[in-house]
Image: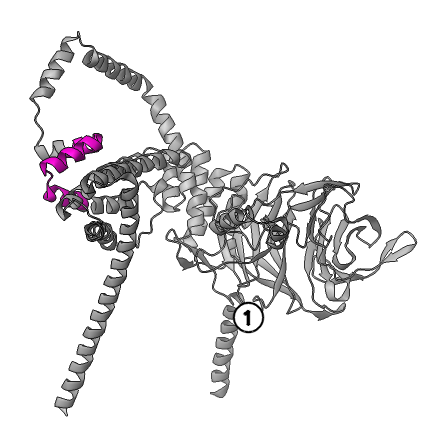
Amino acid sequence: MKRIIATIIAFVLLFTGITASASVYDSYTYNNQDEEVPVQDGYSVAHTISGKGDFGSLAAPSDVAVDEDGYIYVLDSGNNRVVVFDNNFSFVKSIDKFKNGKKTETLLLPNGIFARNDKLYISDTENSRVLVTDENGKVLTILESPDDSAFPADITFKPERLAADGRGNVYVLCAGMYYGAVMYDEEGNYSGFFGSNKVEMTVSDLIEYAWKQLMSQEQRQKMQRFLPMEYSGIDIDENDMVYACSPYESSDNSIRKINPKGNNVLYAEKEFGDRDEFVHNNFYDITADEDGIISCLDTKYNRIFQYDEDGDLLFILGRTGSQEGTFSEPIAIAAYGEGLLVLDRKKQNLTYFEPTDFGNSVRLALRQHSDGEFEKAAESWQKALKENINFEAAYLGLGKNEYFRGNYEKAAEYFRIADNQEWHSKAFKEIRADWFRDNLSWILSAICVVCLVLFLLLWKKSPLHKRAVKLVEKIHLPDTISEILTTVCHPISGYEDMRRNRSGSPLAGFLIILIVGVSMVFRIRCTGFRFNDYSQTVNLLIVFACAVGLILLFTIANWALCVLFESEARYREIFICTSYSFVPFILSIVVSTLLSYFLCVDEGMILTLVSAIGILWTVILFFFGMKEMHQYTATKTIWSLLLTLVGVVLLLFLLFMITSLVQQMVSFIKTLYTEISYRLML
């Protein structure tokens, strides 16, 4: 009996151990609501090189590189050497001395290593140089601080990470270097800077710049300069595309794919890292494999973010921990075939992650798509979806397959499921172009007919013109609608007549304010998919209440304030003037929302223009209306409106205090009632 129980326990422990080792972290991705959702592991731990072995022990390792033959080079910075392993993860040799003719060179706290074309490129940081050697440590070239007037003289040359392309050009990232990578040609000559990072100006930067203009030269030198952020990691793939990451940039600039011309070819609106506004990832190192898949190491939360060649998210893996497959202080990442090598400085080990079956399905689909085998890629994506029906990257891949096969409507459906506005816009543009081509004759005919009708309507000698004039004269709009149209089209005369005749409908004004709230809800819920960036969890009732409430608060604050400024307007007139002014705003929302179904993402400026016109028109109506109703000068009107905004803020604060007080009173009454009920029961 004891043997049976022991056998059962052994099997339970065995299977529990397998599960734990296969997934020591919770892999996740993001859905179309930017919410974290669990996903199958794309990678699992296959091998770990411990910090101690035949090679001794690692001390503060700083970087890892892989050559074309599968040899792994670990830069053991604390021991000032390079440790070499073969493709079976077996120790081969250790290089701590480098032959430079008759001299012997040694390293001093190196930080970066790269292998390509039977050469090793090593950043000998504290010696302020880069060694280019063969695989046995024979020095071929030494790259030092450029002796060039174009190179900043105030920067100490401290090379850290580096990479080399197929032509032998070397790209070096230096500590404190904000101008991009220092570039050397094959012969070791300085060629300038590559992939310079652009300065991101913020409001505080602009204020600081304005102050600088009023300061002396000495004061300016003491202030911080406007400098772009520096890169922390760099890698180059087989096609000489440069990949760089920056730990200081915003989420849409932290990862870059730079072509030989120095331009970032990733879509400008890509969002990298976690999508929580309170989480800022620290992307320290980057690598790209033979399939163009980008993997970036986040050293703040000890995670790996992986993207396809277009920058679309595939997997997020890793976490902080002491188990195999988790990290304590990851410092470097390198692609190794289809897997990943991650170097941990604190654990002093190197971990190899290989793709799982699910990860292999995704990688195979991406490779087949890149090779133009769209039907096979679709099968691979469908296989991945069988394992995870909610994997949005698969729907995006299926959409791309259909797009390149010319099935744009089917592609648009997949892109909609994947919540990818960029690719959905591309598919819609093709659908729209096909529709115009198929209906071109009808469109041209309709344009000709419309032009002819307009000509006959405007030509005074035309019988159609006379009939149209008589028909318009017979149309009598209700006085309220006519008055609203007059104020919208002719604000000065319209508001003057309204003030003189004491006209205007408070009921119509209240309906307009309600329509403003409805239009805000309409924009959130009905904007076309390609332009709808609103969260589906938005409380529409709160949006409606805020829109209506703020307008009403503004009228109250303006009336209360202007009573003190000798205004001739009553609250009724202020209310009507304010509400009538929002008609263009409502129209702009309706027009832009409807246009969002017919425009592509790169035509979004049209929607911005429509919205801007509506807001500007509303502001103009509001200004002239308040000026006329209060009988103020232009300057006094502006001051009254600014003070009214201050009054709205004070009213909001007062409402907040009253609400808090009421909540406390209700809570006190409930507590008192509970206490009395409890004592009566005793």
Residue sitting at x 51%, y 40%: 369
Residue sitting at x 17%, y 42%: 512
Instruction: Check the image and report above or below for 594 versus 126.
Output: above
Please name the amino acid that badge 1 sits on: Gly
Per the rendered image, the range of residues in magenta is 484-513
Left or right: 625 as drawn, with respect to 170 = left
Does the magenta segment cover residue 222? no
The residue sitting at the right extreme is: 102
Residue 542 appears in which quarter of the rendering? bottom left
Instruction: Check the image and report above or below for 471 versus 651.
Output: above
**For the C terminus, which image quadrant?**
bottom left
Q: Using the image as rendered, state which of residue 18 and residue 669 is in the foreground.
A: 669
Q: Position of residue 274 (x, y in %)?
A: 47, 57
Does the magenta segment cover residue 504? yes
Q: Position of residue 185 (x, y in %)?
A: 75, 40
Q: Position of residue 103 (x, y in %)?
A: 90, 55
* Residue at mark 1: 321
Q: Using the image as rendered, state which of residue 408 and residue 544 is in the foreground.
A: 544
Residue sitting at x 59%, y 59%: 353
Magenta portion: prevailing SS class: helix
